[in-house]
Amino acid sequence: MTSDIIFSLAIILVSIIWIIKGVFELGFWNPGVSAGSGFIPTIFAAVTLVSTVLVIISDMKKRYISQNEKADIKTEVQNSKGGAENKEKESKLDSGDISKCVAWLTHLNIYVPVLFCIAGIISLKLFGLVITVFAVLTSWLHFISRINWKKSLLVSSVITLVIYMVFEFWLGVPFPGDILKL
Amino acid sequence: MADNLMLLLKGFGVALSPYNLFACIVGGIMGIIVGAVPGIGAVSGCALLLPITYNMDPTAAIIMLAGIYYGNMFGGAYSAILINIPGDSPAVVTALEGYPLTKKGLAGKALFTANFASFIGGTISIILLTALGPFLARFALKFGPVEMASLIFMSLTSIGWLLGDDPLKGIAATGIGVMISTIGMDASSANFRYTFGSTNLLSGISFVPLVIGLFGFSQVMKMMSDDKVDNEAVKYVGKLRLRDSVLSKKEMLALLPTCIRASLLGEFIGFLPGAGGTTASFLSYMMERKINKNRDRMDGKQGSFEGICASESANNAAAGAAFAPLLTFGIPGSSTTAVLLGGLLAWGLKPGPLLFQNEPDFVWGLISSMYIGNVLCLICGLLCIPLLMKFLRIQGNVMAPIIIVICIVGAYATNNSMFDVWVMLTAGVFSYYLQKKGFPVAPLVLGFVLAPLFEMKVRQSLEISNCDLTVFLSHPISLFFLLLAFVLITTPAVLNLMKKVKERRAT
């Protein structure tokens, strides 16, 4: 929930920057001439700002309600001892903590494609298309997807060949590759 | 009309000559391939292949380039449906509605629907181009900046269908899309906006890398977060036969009205200068979300054949229609036809009303070739389905790195710029979090697509009227669209109010 609010706050911050720049730097309205460069960006940034503020308020409301519900369950558990029902409720609270931990771990997983992409961009700039595509595919297939070397190399070779034929050979896209270009 | 038919028959004689027929086939197949490859698109495809046509006969050359253009509209749907990466911008809506069908194991039928809708859109477009081309192009010229601004305003206000579960988040996403589109040079005043000193941002954010990131890269991140690296569609893919993908006669008849409506709207949008296939597919989808009897399924989550029809028929119709203002007035209706205009001028042809009189073989040969090309694209598209379905047999853990590589290469190929790859990556990460926090992505794309045209037309209208805002009310067509926008905004609120009153009365 906190991350939701941080995300919304980031949108609000960007909207404010858009409005300030739109009104004070670019110009909002030139009477008798035309609308300024900041006219449309400012209007839409204001719409974004207002709607995101309302999103935060609505999220806070939801958070308040869910916190109250959790507090009610805890008090119920504390007040009465034993019983299958209470055990179930207790486990609900515990499972919440475990799921948080699992969510945190899987959250790190999502950065794997990001890291591969960054490595791919750097490699594309340095080594060109063929080496980059082949390296990204082989390393992912073997280390992330746990496919054996033989199959990984075979799949990577075929895909690299197809991509090379379409983009570089047929369409003539000029890929970089300052150090070693294939 | 009878004259047009006679000229059309004569045109078929020209188009069916072996050389022109070969050019048509090559253009159509190339268009399908270029359309299916993310990051290239019709404009780049035509631009890349324009130089090789300089030594060709002008009729064969334009037939080939036109084939690439409408073949591209067919092909754009394939990668959108199979891997959720639109091959070109008009296929964004197809990705929204087609990919969920792939996840349900209906990829074959979705691909068939896309081909069927593209064919209907293309055919209606060419028939109308033959019969009413010059007349409709004249009518479209009545759409000045004021009318266009109101038309786009109506489109932006009727995005309720795209907003998802939380309308506030949908509105915010639309605003974000518009804000991103304002980065770079202001086309009206040549001022640089929101570049923050970066030279890479001077030309703004390119659409294709943005869309590849928003839809393609974010999908890989989602696969990793859900730990669903196994491709869900694989479980459902049975036999890879064309007949298993074919829609029944009943299904086709049910989809036909959607295709016809979308084609007519796409045809009209195609005539408007600067609007193009992307606007046509979005507007058509919005219209269907309002009026289609199966509109509940068209939410971008469940996937619907009607949604694919709305998008594909409209963008194919717009592609065909864009030839009317190009040939009759020399005004390109889209960026691709602008490239074609360059080709026409290079071949020594002067588009305009006299082109029909002075070069009838060329004009009618081209129009006739579009009939042939449309049928050829349909045949190629249908034959490709079993081949494309094999793509789904690739496991998710193999598919993920392929998507990453396609995202990188496709984003780079758009403008041969490394900055675009960073844009794609940023858009992908942003889209992942946006969706995770419950913000829909589709309104962002719509805002991004429509905002530049909307801003330009609004400012032109204000310049014409010396900043008089009543100009939007004084033009009848504009007033009509504004009233329609008002109805679209207020209808849900009124219906809600009526529902509440009914409930109160009942209790």
Image (tube, grey):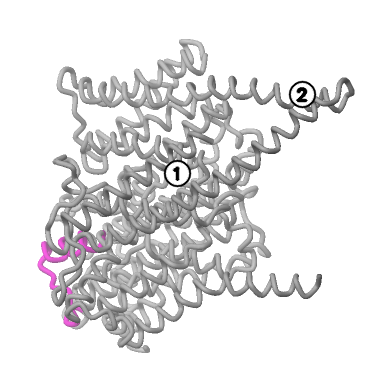
Q: Which residues are magenta?
A: B336-355
Q: Do tags 2 and 1 sit on the same chain?
A: no
Dot 1 surroundings within 10 Å: few (below 14), some, or many (20 or more)?
Answer: many
Q: Which residue is mark 1?
A: B79
- Relative depth, front residue between B306 and B147: B147
Q: Is residue B257 visible?
A: no
Q: Chain of mark 1?
A: B
Is residue B33 on the magenta stretch?
Answer: no
Residue type at the position of mark 2: Glu
Q: Position of residue B75 (x, y in %)?
A: 41, 50
Q: Chain of mark 2?
A: A
Image quarter where the C terminus of chain A lies is top left
- 3D distance between C-alphas at marks 2 and 1: 48 Å
Question: Horizontal placement of B143 versus B111: left or right?
Answer: left
Q: Is residue A142 visible?
A: yes
Q: For mark 1, give the secondary structure.
A: helix
Task: Note whether A145 is above or below B443 in the view shown.
Answer: above
- Relative depth, front residue between B20 and A152: A152
Dot 2 surroundings within 10 Å: few (below 14), some, or many (20 or more)?
Answer: some
Tag nearer the camera, 2 or 1: 2
Residue type at the position of mark 1: Ser
Q: Which residue is mark 2?
A: A90
Q: Residue at x 89, y 23 (%)?
A: A83
Q: Position of residue A15 (x, y in %)?
A: 33, 50
Q: Residue at x 50, y 11 (%)?
A: A148
Q: Main secondary structure of the magenta part?
A: helix
Residue occupying the far front of the picture: A79
Question: Horizontal placement of A117 versus B225: left or right?
Answer: left
